[in-house]
Image: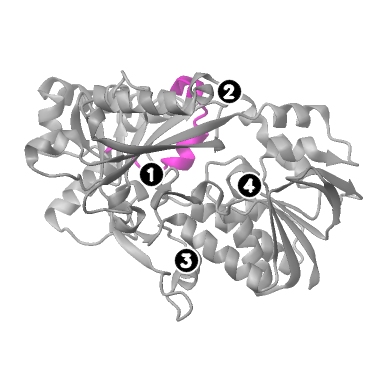
Amino acid sequence: MEGKAIIVGAGPAGLTASYELLRRTQIHPVIVEESEEVGGISRTVNYKGNRLDIGGHRFFSKDKRILRWWETIMTKTIEDSERELLTINRVSHIYFLRKFFSYPISLSKDTFLNLGLRNALRIGLGYIRARLFPTEELTLEDFYINRFGRPLYELFFEDYTTKVWGKHPSELCADWGRQRVKGLSLPVVLEDYFRKSTRGEDRSKEVEASLIESFRYPKYGPGQLWECVAEDVVRKGAELRKGQSVRKIHVDGNRVRSVDIVGSNGEWTNEVCDYFFSSMSIKDLVAALEGIVVPENVRRIAADLPYRDFITVGLLVNKLEFLKEKGANLLPDTWIYIQERDVKVGRLQIFNNWSPFLVKDPEHTVWIGLEYFCDENDELWNMGEEDFIQMAIGEMENIDMLKRESVIDAHQVKVKKAYPAYFGSYGELEEVRRFLDTIENLYCIGRNGQHKYNNMDHSMLTAMEAVSNVENHILGKDNIWLVNTEQRYHEKVY
């Protein structure tokens, strides 16, 4: 099988598609990447030798193909002895009421002491009521209450979810919970606690991912893997065009025939193709279609699809304030979920614990990432970089995490369309999908390509399924869209 494939985006989906095309077919991949970097949101940002993992990427999957794929890419070779997958212990906490709670919430003594007897009783009674009188799951709020009860939902889900999405859970579609939380509920958390307490065995193959206690991780962050993939595919014949973007997609006879590409210098070129793999946002994809009648309703739905944008502030500090009384300088956490209502920060990463190789001087400094969820052109997004950094430092001081004088250096990273959101016109997305599936050689892959909050392994699987369809001359696209609709594991509860 021969031909040329245009692949939009050099993130996990686009690079996986390129790798698989080269491995399984004679099709020539041309990867068009708007930025000057590879990896998409899974890239690693290097700031003066300190590396930022944007959003945090735990390498965990229940699909053996993905596990083998990662191992193959990151196996040490004579040419590159730095390729290595570390095994990292997963430790996370919730920071709420200026106290640390286990994540996910467990039946530990500390949890009861932090909550108090009254709240503990309310949670138990609330859960019983939810099980006896479940509500129809129309919204994410309904979903959470049915699984955890209203008191626990109000304490640990309501405000944080609003912070992440900028919408109250009652305004969000229940699909997000079904996709990201699925099998996790209060009984599952309790079962996990009792099993660990009584047997302590390794159950990584049967538990929800939010309960998984270890994961694999590239030595220099997730971007290292995608930089290695990019090097491998280019060496094997793929073209990687950075700083270029697809602006028009020319369709004729229900097939993409060519695309117009604009470079960073503003020069336009037309590229003929036999296959088109899109990890660009559906909003931009539909807007770029030419030569085909796009129903007005499809244009409206695509144009109105919502996204949540993301800002990370990396702070290099010499100590974390809340540890001074313990005589320590570092918590064991990879992530800390900040549920305090008086600050905008959503999560805190401690990069030393993801991998000591992310930090230039891990013995004497702590490299943390403060994660903020926002909308492009809102107050947070439009704030000047220095003002934003000073605000972030002030928030850390306010919740007793650090002192301003302990900050050595800082860096800010912004990411557009980081999270496809499940409100607005999302509920009508199926109509857009049906239309796009009529274009025979168009394959929507990845997180933004499907407007689905996929983990990295799911984005890769959409690309693998798409290549399988090409290889086996399968016109249907259901198998691609069905990735991450039935598997019972996910990374985040919120």
Residue 450 against residue 18 in the figure, above or below? above
Q: At 76% from the left edge and 61% from the top edge, which residue is drawn?
A: 5
Label 2 residue SS: loop
The residue labelled by disc 1 is: 183
Q: Using the numbered discs, state the Cα–Cα distance from disc 2 to disc 1 in whole angstroms.
A: 36 Å
Tell me the number on the disc at residue 70: 3
Q: Tell me the amino acid under the disc marked 1.
A: Gly
Residue 168 colored magenta?
Answer: yes
Q: Which badge, 2 or 3, comes first in the chain's sequence?
A: 3
Give SS at disc 3.
helix
Dot 4: element: loop
Q: Mark 4 sits on what residue?
A: 35
Q: Mark 2 or mark 1: name the one nearer the start of the chain.
A: 1
Residue furthest out toward the bottom: 78
Q: Is residue 444 inside the magenta stretch?
A: no
Q: Amino acid at mark 3?
A: Trp
Residue 117 locus on image (x, y percent): 10, 24
Magenta highlight range: 166-186
If you read the primary sequence from the N terminus, does the residue marked by circle 4 or circle 2 appear first?
4
Front label number (4 vs 3): 4
The residue drawn where x is 13% and y is 51% is 197
Label 4–label 3 contact, CB within 8 A: no
> What's under tag 2, amino acid-wise?
Asn
Question: For residue 377, which numbered disc appears in the image?
Answer: 2
Q: CA distance from mark 1 to mark 4?
A: 37 Å
Crowd tier of the residue under label 4, counting other residues whose Cα lies within 10 Å: few below 14, some 14–19, many 20 or above? some
